[in-house]
Image (cartoon, helix red, strand yellow):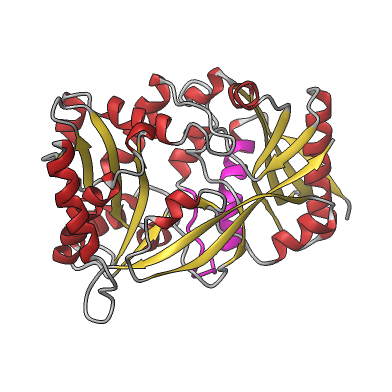
Amino acid sequence: MAVTIKKVETKADLKKFARLNYQLYKDCEYAVPDLLEDLLDTFNPKKNAAYDFCEAELFLALRGDEVVGRVACIINHKANKRWETNNARFGWIDFIDDPEVSEALISTAEEWGRQKGCDKLVGPLGFTDMDPEGMLIDGFDQLSTMSTIYNFPYYPEHMERLGLTHEIDWVERKVMVPHAGHEAHQDKYFRVAELVKKRYKLHIHKFKNAREILKGQYQYPIFDVVNRAYANLFGYSEMSKKQIDRYSEMYLRFLDTRMVSVVETEEGEIIAMGITMGSLSHAIQKAKGRLFPFGWWHLLKAMKFKHSKIIDMLLVGVVPEWQNRGVNALLFADLIPTFMEMGFESAETHPQLETNHQSQDQWAYLDCTIHKRRRCYQKAL
């Protein structure tokens, strides 16, 4: 039976789009499903502030009445202006292992981009860098995280067969929390941290809880660090206040503020931040990607009563003018003892661009290994 492409136009279509990933990967021990409620909000222009500067359309691949693939087609006009590009993006792509299905999806994305006047297709990318991006090309036997993409090994094979080529890669590291046999040279972070604190009169600011962050509106200077630190990284577009509000709403509910660290100057300016949390991967798997009616219990249990042994390092950044001064050592010197005290065994870094050597070098004094690699593909239109 031939494959047909259907544009997502109804709430029922969107629900099918949102749940396809779970259906494909429900028996895969490494995949973490999208959280249904968050994904529905992501594609709601009234709730996702990225629609202020992005346009998007979603498509389903059908064989008869069965959904066998999905893809989101996106243009981030702010990023195109910032980087002087004219790109269309594809994201949230999933498909069964059938060349006819993947070809139909990519052909749809290509035609959509051409109709919009774009000259290149890139992806997988989301609306912004805060969305999952990069197709997994190595590390298929590693547990995914709630904020990254997992895909089967056949996905990149299909992309290459369709003429898509390497645009840029990200790498992820498994970092061992220092304990017996894994101490490495982590003591250097503490020595550097003490020197940097005294030389520049810096200090660590800790928060009692998420309410303190919101009440003091600390989320804005914290995300300003992200905007400034990530400004020159591939495809980045600056987050607006509305976006910061949305991400704060999405993630603050999950954070244990013991695992959040910010560096301030003597005057109280935030110049660096590290946002980490206990992994919710297994909890989301148990919840089957849904908070309601009962999925919330698995997440609450993982956050409050029996946390994972794995840390997700969501965001780590230092503003440009303070980079290369050892400021990141203050973050590690603050967080490492917390991780040890809480009984964590390892940490999962966020995806880091292969070209961002400065960011990758910060792990040099810890016992770690690159265990995942993901790719952004491109194709001229």
Residue 312 location, x and y as percent?
35, 56
Return the residue nearer the eye: 217 or 61: 217
Looking at the rendering, in which quadrant would you find the C terminus?
top right
* Residue range highlighted in magenta: 13-34
State which quarter of the image contains the N terminus: bottom right
Q: Is residue 62 left or right of residue 243?
A: right
In the rendering, at what x and y percent does residue 194 appear?
14, 51
Q: Residue at x 32, y 67 (%)?
A: 366
* In magenta stretch: residue 19: yes
Residue 266 sits in which quadrant? top left
The magenta stretch spans residue 71? no
Q: Nearer the viewer, residue 113 or 326?
A: 326
Q: Residue reaching furthest top?
A: 52
- Determine the residue located farthest toward the front in the rendered image: 199
- The residue under the point 19% across, 68% down is 343
Do we see residue 131 in this rendering? yes
Q: Residue at x 23, y 58 (%)?
A: 189
Could you tell me residue 166's position as x and y percent? 72, 52
Please tell me in which quadrant of the rendered image residue 75 appears: top right
Measuring from the top left, give residue 142's x and y in whole percent: 49, 69
Number of callouts: 0
Q: Work out whether 355 lies above or below 344.
A: above
- Name the side, left or right, on which 341 lies relative to 171: left
Residue at the extreme bottom of the image, as rendered: 181
